[in-house]
Every structure is written in C-alpha cells, then in structure tokens.
Amino acid sequence: MKKILLSVCLMLPSVNAFADTSYSKEKEVKFLVSTNDYSMIQIDGVKLKSADADSKYCDIDIARSKKLGKVVFKPVSDKKFTLFVTDVQGNTYPVRVVPNKKTAPDVFVIQPKEKKTEVSAADLLKLRRVNYAISTSNSRIKIATNLLTSMANGVVPYNVDVEKNNKSLYLWEEVKFNRDFSYKLGSLTGTKYTIQNITDKPMVILEKEFYTIAKNVLGVGVESPRLMPGEKTSVYVVNVSQ
C-alpha cells in the first residue's frame, strides 16, 4: 500500500476575500460585478492570453493580471459593458458585466465544456477494480478520506464510477500538470492529477496549494511532496460536486 500525505478538512479554506462563481461556456453569461474594488476572471485549467474592454467602462489592472494569471478588473461607471477574455488556445469568451455598488468583489471562473471519455479495459487494469464498496453511511469526511485512499492505492470500489480525462492543464510556469482520472461517488468527485517539476531546482509541493483547484474541496493527497528536477508525483483531490 502506498504511503501518501492526506489532508482532510471540514470546509473549504479561503485564500482571499473573493467568492467563486462559475459558468459553462455554452450558457449566456451575465456577471453582477462590484464597483467598489477589483474582481477577477479566470478560465478553469487554461492559461489566459488577453482581455479587452472599453476603457470608458472598465479598468483592467494589467500588471496584476499578468502576475496572477487572471483578469483583474473593475467597472469605472454604472454602465453595462462586455469584457472579452481570450485564452492561449484562441478561444474568446464574451462576458457581460453589470456594475453594482452593493455586491462584493468576486472571482468568476469560466469552465469550458469538456468531452467525456470512457475508461478503456487497459486503463482499468492500471486502476484495478475491487469487489468491495466505500460505505456511504459514514460522515462526508470519512467517505472523502476513504475515496482519497482508494485513489492513491490505484483501486476502484464497485460503487465508484471512473472516467479518463488525460487533459493537460495550466497550474504554474514551473510545472507540467495533467488531469488523469475522475472518480464519482454520490455527491463527491475525486480527481487524480500528475504534476512534474520542469525547473532545474528542487521544489516542494504543498497540499494547501490544491484547496483552490476546485470548489468545495474536502481533502487533498500528495504522493511525494519533494520533487527533484524532472520528477513527477501524483496529487489527489476530493471535492463536493455541484
């Protein structure tokens, strides 16, 4: 059995004062945005390339946007306007912004629709189906812990559905990051990621850095927190599905 660092909490830790709002690429978008301070927009798993809006209605903090990898912006009038956000893959997302003095600053997350891929027999051999189930009568934290442990040991209990993702994501400049598999158990979703150090220096992977990778994260597991140049490790995240 693999030894893995597991971290489980009762609530999602906050790294800033922003709320988190998401939407699908296919839906019509209209965001109620604070005029009192800067809000942010990011695209889930994809690096931003640019953002554009009429300067009469919107102030984009270019320096902070480049540093954070998010669009940092604030309406400068009470007029509605459209903010065009473009990712590195060339996809442009028009965001209709409705300024509001009473609302708080938000982080708005654009989530492109993904094509689901069935898990092949070869992939299931790597994961190893088992003939026992994870009990869903326990507390949510206990269920999340059991799901993390199953993922880390490469097993799939018979009441857990698994889906192959194999999608490259943007996390930091210093790493390659890939989403490998997703696991579904009731209202919980578990995700297995692979992360690789692509720098020429050792790095430490901290569990707390992955509590903002999804909404309502309950637990995180890191197989090997210390990575030498070129080394890879697995990261496991369990969150409450929307």
Image (cartoon, rainbow, N blue to C red):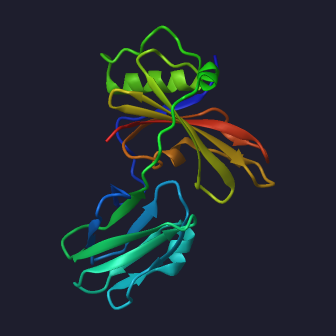
Residue 198 shown left or right of residue 69 in the figure: right
Q: From where the camera sits, is residue 64 visible?
A: yes
Residue at the extreme top: 131
Q: Which residue is outermost to the bottom?
A: 56
Front in this rendered view, residue 207 or 124 = 124
What residue is at 73 percent from the left and 42 percent from the top? 227
Q: Position of residue 59 (x, y in %)?
A: 39, 84
**Above-or-below relation of 181 to 112:** above
Asked if 184 appears above or below 99 in the picture, the reply is above
Residue occupying image coordinates x 47% and y 76%: 51
**Residue 72 x %, y %:** 43, 73
16 and 118: which is toward the camera: 118
Residue 16 at least partly seen: no
Horizontal side of 141 relative to 61 (left or right) equals left
- Indicate whether 82 appears above or below 109: below
Total numbered circles: 0
Q: Position of residue 198 (x, y in %)?
A: 75, 52
Taking the image as shown, residue 44 lies to the left or right of residue 174, namely left
Quadrant of the image for the C terminus?
Answer: top left
Q: Position of residue 114 (x, y in %)?
A: 46, 48
Choose top left, top right, bottom left or bottom right for residue 36: bottom left
- Residue at the limit of the structure toward the left, as seen here: 102
Q: Nearer the viewer, residue 242 or 211?
A: 242
The quarter of the picture where the N terminus appears is top right
Up/down of 186 relative to 208, above or below: above
